[in-house]
Amino acid sequence: AQSVTQLGSHVSVSEGALVLLRCNYSSSVPPYLFWYVQYPNQGLQLLLKYTTGATLVKGINGFEAEFKKSETSFHLTKPSAHMSDAAEYFCAVSDRHQAGTALIFGKGTTLSVSS
Amino acid sequence: NAGVTQTPKFQVLKTGQSMTLQCAQDMNHEYMSWYRQDPGMGLRLIHYSVGAGITDQGEVPNGYNVSRSTTEDFPLRLLSAAPSQTSVYFCASSSTIADQETQYFGPGTRLLVL
């Protein structure tokens, strides 16, 4: 069965500091991996995704993530945090490479950014 | 395109009442799904549909019904609301053709059951 573990329910960084949000997954087949962001009182917005090909994936707002099969990880990073990055971030996995596939979500990590 | 829309944005119910959460998409997506979001739990799948007339259960289906009579609409029905159904509900859709691995989410419905 698939599962997603996000390490750290709350991460705090200073503006300009590196952002690192950790995600580990388990899947019996090559997974599709996603990061979504949720701003307060809003829906989920796709940040980036990994399906096949290059393991370093670049997303919106300067975020990127690297798929590491040997570590079963898909950590999200951003070199320099901005106040507007404060939000909740969800890692998700899908192991069926077709439509009609639900996502399995992690429990989320809330990112706080201080000035 | 409006994308995925959900109504109402917020609803208060009394225990035992019924209601329908509406979800519509204008992207001609065949796949639609309902999730609930609870603090510290992430999003959990309630029901999903791979096309008109086809639905199936997800991880937490008890207390909820769905039907899919058109490609555009996927309503979620609570037959007899319980306080445990207090949550934020998200509808999502994806294409069977283009960009099929990406799901697009609606803005959510906040439900409070007293």
Image (spheres, helix red, strand yellow):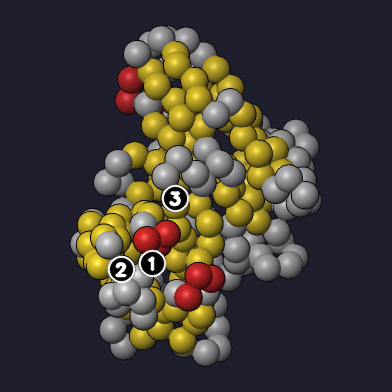
Could you tell me the amino acid type at mark 2?
Glu
Chain label for disc 3? A
Q: Nearer the viewer, residue A97 or B72?
A: B72
User: Is B73 situated above or below A76?
Assistant: above
Could you tell me the amino acid type at mark 1?
His
Check residue B3 in the rendering and tell me which mark sits there, or answer none: none
Q: Mark 2 sits on what residue?
A: A15
Query: Are there few (<14), some (14-19), or many (20+) residues within 10 Å of tag 3?
Result: some
CA gap between label 2 and label 3 equals: 17 Å
Check residue A39 in the rendering and tell me which mark sits there, or answer none: 3
Looking at the image, tell me whether mark 2 or mark 1 is earlier in sequence order.
2
- Tag in front: 3 or 1: 1
In the picture, measured across the screen, residue B66 lies left or right of residue A56, that is right
Chain label for disc 2? A
| Helix, strand or loop at mark 3 | loop
User: Is A13 situated above or below B21?
Assistant: below
In the picture, measured across the screen, residue B19 lies left or right of residue B93, that is left
Could you tell me the amino acid type at mark 3?
Tyr
| Helix, strand or loop at mark 2 | loop
Determine contact: label 2, label 1, CB under 8 Å: yes
How many numbered marks does the figure carry?
3
Looking at the image, tell me whether mark 2 or mark 3 is earlier in sequence order.
2
Residue B101: % across, % down = 60, 66
Quarter of the rendering occupied by the C terminus of chain B: top left
Name the residue: 27% across, 62% down: A115
Determine contact: label 3, label 1, CB under 8 Å: no
Q: Mark 1 sits on what residue?
A: A82
Chain label for disc 1? A
Name the residue: 38% across, 55% down: A87
Name the residue: 59% across, 57% down: B103
Query: Are there few (<14), some (14-19), or many (20+) residues within 10 Å of tag 2?
Result: some
